[in-house]
């Protein structure tokens, strides 16, 4: 009993190290982080809580809840900065970990819940998204809570009125990322009902009252923003970012099998146990017919198929199916630990091959760094040590047939990888990714009231670091020529790769240049 009481404490400690350590140390990296930071900065400066804008234009890609969370954090510290913008995803990452633990404890056992939560916390994609300024982890947390209360109500693990809490969290998820906040839970629940042929659950779902709760949570802001923009925000949001994105692949178009290639990488290092688990459970058809297990299967496959059918695909879209995937791995690890399942040849072979390759790759890092980037040799050494030791320790426990130690060693490996990345890798990459140093140089050259333009770029990092609400974007050569013909001073930012399009600009107009990394910027004077 004492061990079970300690599980949440250990999970909070694990999440704190994985998600919060060095959270605000690096600058914003394009494309998404500076855009979200700039939206929050403008709202903070103007005291705006309803209409999000970026570079002077209406921002209709995402709803408002993420920005509200950033604004609240920024109000507490007095400014919008790297820490306040990344705090909501980090807190949401912790929330998803604890919610996964709650799923395991309610439907299986506290031990399985603990293993599942630790598995989820230490997957590559969850760590990445919890430390990045994206809306997705906040969405997954609210979505997982809606599924938690819905499953407890419909599978009779809790009170039936908990279904109303599920609708409330669907409303919050919708305020975070859009209609997907209600579409995904509905799809999963209907799929589960159809497979089980238990349509009575529609009555138990309290749909009429649930719609009222959902609209009460999500409706007011959508009404206010639509009224404030004369319907434009809502029209663009529904058509461009829902209908068009799902059906036409205007951005991020991929093939149908795209997620078969990305999910194994995103779920590392625990992917190595997924195939052995499938082999172990494939013959036990009774497991798949249990309502609890069937519910999580419906959850996983409904989301996987839904996003596979979409013409627009991104690897992070599958984050909502990570909790059932983690529960699946946790059940398998628990059966190995208890001896209910044998440590099969498939399990040992997959684990030994992966863990054996890891030290080899780690030791090869300094050699590759010395040949390709000699200046990165020093940061490759701690990374090599972590990968070598991190592979050898669980490798040893696999040979000794100690699955609990394998689980613990793999989890600790990810902790050291995050620490290594925060202390050495990210600071090294900062010199190539951050626009802050060049922005400070531009501030010294360009007077505050002088016009500043940017050529063919919409990343918004210069908006944020130059503290300019609007930097007009020039898309064509004729637009630049028109500015050159007008009187008065002005400046333009342009990447090196775009200079070929404007090769007629004389070199003496180049007043500043950033020459770090592969993305180099130039500041051009539009008048002599």
Image (spheres, grey):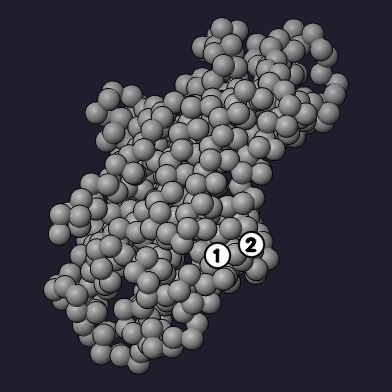
Residue depicted at 26% across the width and 72% down the height: 107
Q: Is residue 113 visible?
A: yes
Q: Which residue is mark 1?
A: 348
Q: Image quadrant of residue 250?
A: bottom right
Q: Is residue 240 visible?
A: no
Residue depicted at 32% across the width and 83% down the height: 291
Q: Quadrant of the C terminus?
A: top right
Q: Is residue 512 left or right of residue 292?
A: right
Looking at the image, which residue sits at the far bottom? 197
Whole-number angstrom distance, CA of label 1 to CA of label 2: 23 Å
Q: Position of residue 432 (x, y in %)?
A: 63, 26
Q: Position of residue 181 (x, y in %)?
A: 37, 62
Foreground pick, 87 / 215: 87
Mark 1 residue element:
helix
Between discs 1 and 2, the one toward the N terminus: 2
Q: Position of residue 117 (x, y in %)?
A: 34, 56
Q: Image quadrant of residue 182?
A: bottom left
Q: Position of residue 28 (x, y in %)?
A: 50, 30
Residue depicted at 74% across the width and 19% down the height: 484
Q: Which residue is mark 2?
A: 261
Q: Is residue 59 left or right of residue 6?
A: right
């Amino acid at each position: 009993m004492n061990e079970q009481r300690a599980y949440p404490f250990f999970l909070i400690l694990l999440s704190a190290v994985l998600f919060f350590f060095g959270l605000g140390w690096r600058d914003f990296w394009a494309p998404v982080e500076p855009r979200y930071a700039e939206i929050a900065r403008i709202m903070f400066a103007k005291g705006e809580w309803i209409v999000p804008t970026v570079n002077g234009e209406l921002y209709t890609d995402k709803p408002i809840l993420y920005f509200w969370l950033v604004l609240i954090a920024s109000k507490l510290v007095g400014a919008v900065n790297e820490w306040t913008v990344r705090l909501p995803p980090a807190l949401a990452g912790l929330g998803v970990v604890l919610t996964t633990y709650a799923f395991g404890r309610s439907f299986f056992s506290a031990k399985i819940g603990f293993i599942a939560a630790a598995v989820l916390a230490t997957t590559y994609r969850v760590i990445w998204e919890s430390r990045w300024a994206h809306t997705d982890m906040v969405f997954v947390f609210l979505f997982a809570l809606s599924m938690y209360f819905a499953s407890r109500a419909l599978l009779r693990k809790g009170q039936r009125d908990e279904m109303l809490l599920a609708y409330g969290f669907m409303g919050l998820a919708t305020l975070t990322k859009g209609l997907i906040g209600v579409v995904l839970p509905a799809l999963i629940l209907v799929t589960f009902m159809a497979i089980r042929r238990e349509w009575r659950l529609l009555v138990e779902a309290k749909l009429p009252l649930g719609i009222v709760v959902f609209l009460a949570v999500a409706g007011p802001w959508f009404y206010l923003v639509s009224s404030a923009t004369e319907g434009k925000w809502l029209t663009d949001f529904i058509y461009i970012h829902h209908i068009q994105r799902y059906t036409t692949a205007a951005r991020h178009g991929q093939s149908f099998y795209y997620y078969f290639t990305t999910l194994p990488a995103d779920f590392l290092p625990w992917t190595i146990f997924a195939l052995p688990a499938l082999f172990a459970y494939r013959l036990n058809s009774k497991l798949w017919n249990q309502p609890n297990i069937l519910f999580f299967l419906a959850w996983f496959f409904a989301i996987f198929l839904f996003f596979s059918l979409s013409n627009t695909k991104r690897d992070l879209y599958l984050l909502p199916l990570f909790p059932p995937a983690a529960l699946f791995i946790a059940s398998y690890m628990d059966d190995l630990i208890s001896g209910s399942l044998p440590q099969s040849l498939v399990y040992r072979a997959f684990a030994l091959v992966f863990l054996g390759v890891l030290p080899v790759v780690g030791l090869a890092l300094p050699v590759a760094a010395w040949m390709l980037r000699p200046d990165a040799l020093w940061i490759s050494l701690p990374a090599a040590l972590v990968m070598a030791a991190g592979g050898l320790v669980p490798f040893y426990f696999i040979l000794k047939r100690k699955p609990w130690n394998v689980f613990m060693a793999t989890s600790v490996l990810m902790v050291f990888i995050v620490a290594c990345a925060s202390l050495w890798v990210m600071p090294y990459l900062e010199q190539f990714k951050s626009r802050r140093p060049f922005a400070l140089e531009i501030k010294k050259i360009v007077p505050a009231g002088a016009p500043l333009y940017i050529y063919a770029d919409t990343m918004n990092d210069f908006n944020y670091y130059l503290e300019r609400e609007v930097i007009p974007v020039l898309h064509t050569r004729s637009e630049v020529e028109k500015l050159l013909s007008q009187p008065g001073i002005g400046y333009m930012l342009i990447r090196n790769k775009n200079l070929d399009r404007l090769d007629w600009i004389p070199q003496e107009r180049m007043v500043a240049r950033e020459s770090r990394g592969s993305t180099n910027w130039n500041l051009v004077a539009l008048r002599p």
